[in-house]
Image: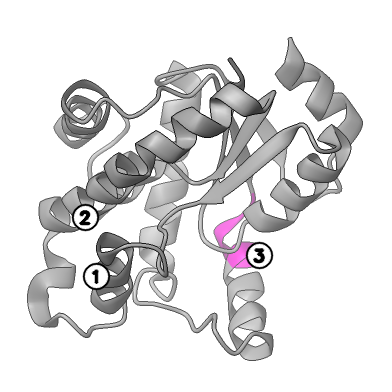
Amino acid sequence: MGRLIVIEGIDGAGKRTLADALAHALDGRVARMAFPRYDEDVYGALIRDALHGRLGPFGDEVYGMAMLYALDRRAAAPDIRAALNTHEYVLLDRYVASNAAFGAARLHEDARGEFVSWVRAIELDRFEVPAPDAHLLLRVSPSVAAERSVHRARTEADRGRDTWESDDALQTRVAAVYDGLAEDDWLAPWHVVDGNTVPEIAELAKRLAE
């Protein structure tokens, strides 16, 4: 059985870049997946529409949006389990902790609040999605992440900023919730990576194998 490794961080932190580097370092032993799966199932498509204001007021509904994210992962769970059976590592760009961090931040709660407990109960207990083995928190200042997000939107035609990415105050609160989840080793051990510098990928890959 492979190890399920999750990369987390605020929008613009550089998660995809880190995932690319780790996949290269792990040299074919890794399967990858990113959430939300915007183009792969109805839940991902609904999430994208809500984040871009195409579902009216639904995008403002914290628990409703969180349920869409949870259903997206529930639908992907068989593929995650299959990948864990055929690869040493399965590397995910966002997972359950993302749902917990963003929802808690939207409700102005912290990592030990009611919403985080609710996400765990829905996704891990009721939907029984595979539990992660480790998290990588790519920590970067919200101002730097915002600059990266704006640059990405300008240079990638399919990566326009959504309403959450454009909310700097929200991103700052999300960063604080992530720090709390990392401090508590929520669901699995957390490794904090400085997103303002170039991480030592070989050393990071070694730590994940332990």
In the rendered image, residue 119, in percent from the top left (x then y), is placed at: 22, 34
- Side (left or right) of 81 relative to 126: right
* Residue 8 % position (x, y): 53, 43
Image quarter of residue 65: bottom left
Which residue is at the front of the view, 91 or 201? 91
| Kind of residue at disc 1 | Leu
Q: Which residues are magenta?
A: 140-145
Residue position marked by numbered label 1 in the rendering: 46
Q: Is residue 99 left or right of residue 148?
A: left
**Mark found first going from the N terminus, 2 or 3:** 2
Give the residue at mark 3: 144
Q: Earlier in the sequence, mark 3 or mark 1?
A: 1
Instruction: Give neighbour class at mark 3: few <14, some 14-19, many 20+ (Cα, 10 Å).
Output: few
Q: Secondary structure at mark 3?
A: helix
Disc 3/disc 1 C-alpha distance (Å): 29 Å
Residue at 77% x, 43% y: name it.
23
Mark 1 in CB contact with mark 2 (< 8 angstroms): yes
